[in-house]
Amino acid sequence: MLPLKELLTNYFLSHQALPAFNIDSFEIYQAVEAAVVNTKLPCIVQLSQSADKFVTAEKLYLLVKKANLEGLPIYLNLDHQSNVDRLRAMSQLFDMLHFDSSKEDFSKSLAVTADLISSLKKLNPALLI
């Protein structure tokens, strides 16, 4: 399976869209996985901060890794997460992290974001942030 950054670059250069699906239940994940089985096309599954409370990133990670072992090109994004500790914890498991500090003032948001990116890139250089 290609690294997500390389896949996104390839899709961009060929003017294709890579679908991303927000997962808020295991039934939604099952439907997405079935679509990947049927089409053989890659996708990103995303978990929002609120859905992380009941689906959990760890459980979704296990489902996706099982699918990857079966040859399915499914990637993981932790979407709109504002908890820095949670992002750090998931940096080894997810292909992409979306940090959301929109509730902070700009200067604080910029400082926290710069620090977070620096620390996450040390933990996982392949990670998209």
Image (cartoon, helix red, strand yellow):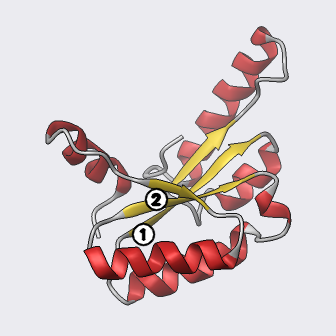
Residue at image position (36%, 74%) is: 36
Q: Could you tell me residue 18's position as x and y percent?
A: 34, 51
Mark 1 or mark 2: which comes first in sequence? 2
The quarter of the rendered structure image containing the N terminus is bottom left
Disc 1 residue crowd, few under 14, some 14–19, many 20+, Cα 10 Å: many
Disc 2 residue crowd, few under 14, some 14–19, many 20+, Cα 10 Å: many
Q: Is residue 8 above or below residue 46?
A: above
Pick the front one: 94 or 36: 36
The quarter of the rendered structure image containing the C terminus is top right
Label ID, residue 93: none
Label ID, residue 44: 2
Q: Could you tell me residue 10's position as x and y percent?
A: 20, 47
Q: Could you tell me residue 33's position as x and y percent?
A: 46, 78
Q: Could you tell me residue 57's position as x and y percent?
A: 70, 67
The residue that disc 1 covers is 74
- Residue 72 seen from this side: no
Give, as a three-letter code, the residue at label 1. Answer: Ile
Residue at image position (43%, 52%) is: 126
Q: Is residue 19 above or below residue 26?
A: above
Quarter of the figure with residue 73:
bottom left
Which element carries disc 2, helix, strand or loop?
strand
Per the model, the C-alpha gap separating discs 1 and 2 is 6 Å
- Residue 18 seen from this side: yes
Give, as a three-letter code, the residue at label 2. Answer: Ile
| Residue sitting at the far left | 14
Tag 1 and tag 2, C-beta contact below 8 Å: yes
